[in-house]
Amino acid sequence: MAGQQGIGKWRDGLDVALRVAIAMLGGYGATAACTMLLARVWPASRLDASLWSTILSFALYAGLVVWTFAAPSALRAGLVVAAIGLAAGLGAALAA
């Protein structure tokens, strides 16, 4: 019995570590891609588009971090953050 409790704690610790990594690294990448996309498609001058997309990026990053820890599993959180980043990156590349 004691061994199974140790495994459960280890898995919980690994889940938290994965979510932290997803939130920090994946959230940063997805936010950067979304910021690039917004800056390129925002209907304003280049300066205003850059400023507003950067301002909105703080809220987006915070939202991704919160959602990463609220997601049902670390795998799902990673897949969703990666999909957001890839879609925004592709959109930014096509908008160039």
Image (cartoon, rainbow, N blue to C red):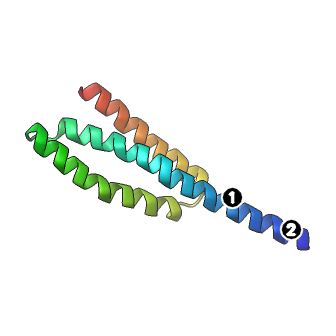
The one nearer the camera, 4 or 57, is 57
The one nearer the camera, 58 or 80, is 58
Residue 57 has which mark?
Answer: none
Q: Could you tell me residue 72's position as x and y percent?
A: 57, 61
**Residue appearing at x 32%, y 43% in the figure:** 34
Inspect the image, locate mark 1, and give the three-letter code of the amino acid beneath it.
Leu
Inspect the image, locate mark 2, and give the three-letter code of the amino acid beneath it.
Gln
Residue placed furthest toward the left? 45
Q: Is residue 47 above or below residue 68?
A: above
Neighbour tally class for label 1: few under 14, some 14-19, many 20 plus, Cα within 10 Å: few
Q: Could you tell me residue 94's position as x and y percent?
A: 29, 26
Mark found first going from the N terminus, 1 or 2: 2
**Residue appearing at x 44%, y 50% in the figure:** 27
Secondary structure beneath disc 2?
helix
Q: Quadrant of the C terminus?
A: top left
Name the quadrant containing residue 66.
bottom left
Secondary structure beneath disc 1?
helix
Q: Could you tell me residue 3's position as x and y percent?
A: 89, 68
**Residue appearing at x 24%, y 28% in the figure:** 95
Q: Is residue 60 above or below residue 83?
A: below
Q: Could you tell me residue 6's position as x and y percent?
A: 83, 68
Circles 1 and 2, Cβ within 8 Å, touching? The answer is: no
Q: Quadrant of the N terminus?
A: bottom right
To which residue does mark 1 refer? 14
To which residue does mark 2 refer? 4
Q: Nearer the viewer, mark 1 or mark 2?
A: 1
The one nearer the camera, 81 or 52, is 52
Name the quadrant containing residue 84.
top left
